[in-house]
Image: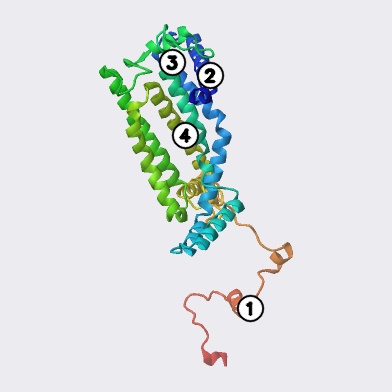
Amino acid sequence: MLDTILFPLEWVVANIMVLWHWLFTTLGMDSASGWAWSLSIVGLVVTIRIMLIPLFVKQIKASRAMQVIAPELKAIQNKYKGKKDQASREAMSRETMELYSKHKTNPFASCLPILVQAPIFFALFRVLNYRIEGTDQAKPIGLLTAELAGEAHDATIFGAQLSETFLSSEGASAKIVSAVLIVAMVATTFLTQRQLTQKNMPAAALEGPMAQQQKILMYALPFIFVITGPNFPVGVLIYWTTTNLWSMGQQFYVIRRNPTPGSEAERQLKARQAEKAKRKGQVIEGTGVDTTVIEASKTGQRQQPKKGGSRAQRKKGPAQTPGNGAAADASESTVDLPEGDDTPSDKDKS
């Protein structure tokens, strides 16, 4: 049953690997080289992840929507907190589903790329474990002939065969390479989850049940790979580590360019935009700071003040406001007295 389900995916995986292997050998690599086959697995990752970009976009939108509705979801949970009767549970479930429907999202939408990659992961596992054997025992599939399968079986990278695992290998080389790749796989998995939760989630989403689930996932996934990693062939470890590195880079680009509103990443984006505007001598919107002085210092020219009022007003002199006219007249009629003269006394005035 499993063979029947996975056979089409095994066929696709094997063909993609062979096509990339053909490209690298055309560029001058040895056909039996472990690097040619390892890079073919990297090429498989690139191909699959490019195909999954639409799903990744959906995942980002779904994840962002879940973060936005986190306060409303928390309010619903608080509303029915402590109520365990059937009616309350049904009402809570109904209101939660209505909230998901209103924002066109659900918790499972953000897991789409992982769910889709799982069958591909198992297909690659079967290709490396059951298809790539010695030339006499090889099980050809698609473009992966018995001869190519034999080459892939004997190919090594740092002394480790791509089909060897940490537990099944007898030599030290395979164990060391497997151990290094397991550490890299676990570290990149953790950093990818941490990047998503710590930098691209608003403060409101960092509290409550959903935040706890994210934290559990952030630590649980790496722990699972620590346990299962020693059973994975070296080729599968290369695939998973490369996938994690791709996810980190893709996620970093999206978070930096289009962060979630209210997140730490958005605050950093606004700070970068303000700094960029400051360097260009523009007025930074929302700060009330006019940066034309900065622009003047760069050009070396002094900014001249604009002359207010019409020509007629300038001929007539400054406009007088009520209550200030007398003071203005007095200031204009003031005459400097010769040195030694005194100002008129009150007696002389009278």
Q: Looking at the image, is mark 4 or mark 2 earlier in the sequence?
A: 2
Q: Looking at the image, is mark 1 or mark 4 earlier in the sequence?
A: 4
Q: Looking at the image, is mark 1 or mark 3 earlier in the sequence?
A: 3
Q: Determine the residue positioned at 49% across, 29% down.
A: 119
- Rounded to the nearest whole Å, what is the CA distance between mark 1 and mark 3? 92 Å
Numbered label attached to residue 11: 2
- Disc 3, disc 2: CB below 8 Å? no
Query: Three-letter amino acid code at disc 2?
Result: Trp
Identify whether 203 is placed above or below 171.
below
- Disc 2, disc 1: CB below 8 Å? no
Q: Which is closer to the viewer, label 1 or label 3?
A: 3
Residue 118: percent from left, percent from top: 47, 31
Query: Three-letter amino acid code at disc 3?
Result: Trp
Q: Badge 3 is on which residue? A: 37
Q: Badge 4 is on which residue? A: 247
Determine which quarter of the picture holds residue 335.
bottom right
Please state which of residues 71 and 224 is positioned toward the viewer in this rendering. 224
Under circle 4, the secondary element is: helix
Q: Looking at the image, is mark 2 or mark 1 earlier in the sequence?
A: 2
- Rounded to the nearest whole Å, what is the CA distance between mark 4 and mark 2? 25 Å
Numbered label attached to residue 325: 1
Q: Looking at the image, is mark 3 or mark 4 earlier in the sequence?
A: 3
Query: Three-letter amino acid code at disc 1?
Result: Gly
